[in-house]
Amino acid sequence: MAGPDIRVQEAPFDLGAESAALSQGRTDIGGLASFVGLCRADDGLAALVLEHYPGMTERALEKIAAEAWARWPLTGCTVIHRVGRLVPGAPIVLVLTASAHRAAALEACAFLIDWLKTSAPFWKREEFADGRERWVEAKASDDAAAARWASGA
């Protein structure tokens, strides 16, 4: 595989289909790691609206994926991030990493999701059943999770 497959889209994705597309017919993959982030229904949330700036967002995701590609011996990587209005239970983000060995696939997957949470340029607005709306602020816990990778952990 030439490098990471990065997509920003409104349409849902299928974990099984994406995993098969990444690994089908490949004999260089010994481990395939995946993470799927779902929209939660915290505090009466009715929907999460994700906005982005086309072009800029894809470039930022490509940069994050290229970092993972350089740090671990990956043989495949897919990152799909959805935008638009998502209801609770809807899939938001998919990270798939493949490597000859499981440790690299698992570590790269964790790295990618930690960095996507803090460095990907998405704007998130929560819509609640009672009509309230609010923009989602960055969380210190997400920053701490991403910071552990800066030291090469």
Image (tube, helix red, strand yellow):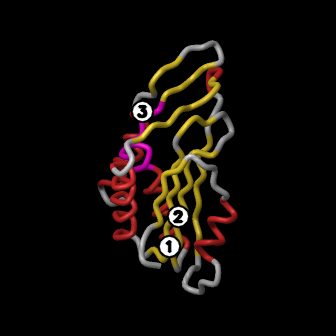
At a point 40% along the width and 50% down the height, the residue shown is 115
Circle on res. 106? 2
Question: Which quadrant would residue 102 be assigned to in this image?
Answer: bottom right
- Residue with the mark numbered 1: 76
Question: Secondary structure under badge 2?
Answer: helix
User: Label 2 sits on what residue type?
Assistant: Leu
In the displayed structure, would residue 121 be above or below residue 46? below
Q: Position of residue 39 (x, y in %)?
A: 61, 38
Q: Position of residue 111 (x, y in %)?
A: 43, 56
- Residue with the mark numbered 3: 139
- N-terminal of the two: label 3 or label 1? 1
Magenta span contains residue 116: yes
User: Label 1 sits on what residue type?
Assistant: Gly
At a point 57% along the width and 45% down the height, the residue shown is 92
Q: Quadrant of the C terminus?
A: bottom left
| Span shown in magenta | 114-124
Q: Position of residue 87 (x, y in %)?
A: 65, 34
